Image (spheres, rainbow, N blue to C red):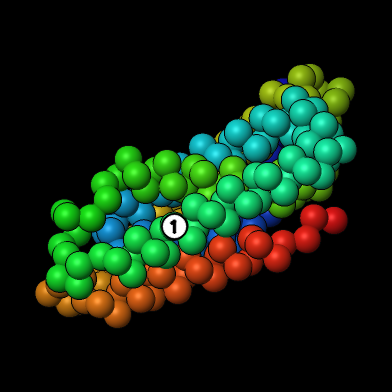
Amino acid sequence: MVEPLTLLAFVPAALALNLTPGADMMFCLAQGVRNGARAAWAASAGIALGGLIHVFIAGAGLSALLTAWPVAFDIIRWVGVAYLVWLALQALRAHPGAEPSALPGSGHAFRGGLLINLANPKVILFVLAFVPQFVTPEAGSVLAQFMVFGGVMAVGGFIINGIVGASADALAQRFKQRSRWLDVVTAGIFSALAARLAILEIS
């Protein structure tokens, strides 16, 4: 249903976008610094699933409803802001000597990554602007094509964001314990993401 040449053109464009630092990558980095590589990969998996959900919404045409009702975007956005602020506070309240095993597990990181991605309304708008350039209605189901392209972006994003988070964990492992400065750095990342989402303008 997707022409090979079209898919071949889409892959490098999608990878270039995956490599661009953004909220998803920073969230995985923070998870790697604070909770370790396993949590970073789990967060990356949650983000990938969130991306697929966004693509499905766009492909199914439901995004038109959200775009026509700006309040829905604001509700989603502020839920994300509140969650990020809560994560920042949790990082600051952590015991300075806490080991990775005593910190939130992979399930928590996965849910966090999923929520962070879903709470960013710009993702839907980006999907609407980017993916349709490669969709050919004559080739078959538009939704199916959206999902194929979304799958490519999800896999690429999962690998790249996971590597970023795992690399952050490797750096943090140079210290015998998760020292206090790591908690402060993590809280700073979450706070910056919350501020970025709070001032986001939907256009």
Q: Is residue 95 above or below residue 86?
A: below
- Dividing the image into 4 quarters, which one contains the C terminus? bottom right
Residue 200, image x, y percentages: 72, 62
The residue under label 1 is 86
Quarter of the image for residue 185 reads bottom left
Tell me, yes or no, if residue 134 can be seen here: no
Q: Amino acid at mark 1?
A: Trp
- Dividing the image into 4 quarters, which one contains the N terminus? top right
Relative depth, front residue between 180 and 7: 180
Q: Is residue 14 above or below residue 142?
A: below
Q: Is residue 140 above or below residue 4?
A: above
Position of residue 199 in the picture relative to residue 132 (left or right) = left
Give me the residue at 30% from left, 45% from top: 106
Residue 62, image x, y percentages: 77, 28
Position of residue 157 in the picture relative to residue 180 (left or right) = right
Relative depth, front residue between 30 and 66: 66
Q: Is residue 86 above or below residue 149?
A: below
User: What residue occupies the far left of the structure in this picture?
Assistant: 176
Quarter of the image for residue 12 reads bottom right
Give me the residue at 64% from left, 60% from top: 197
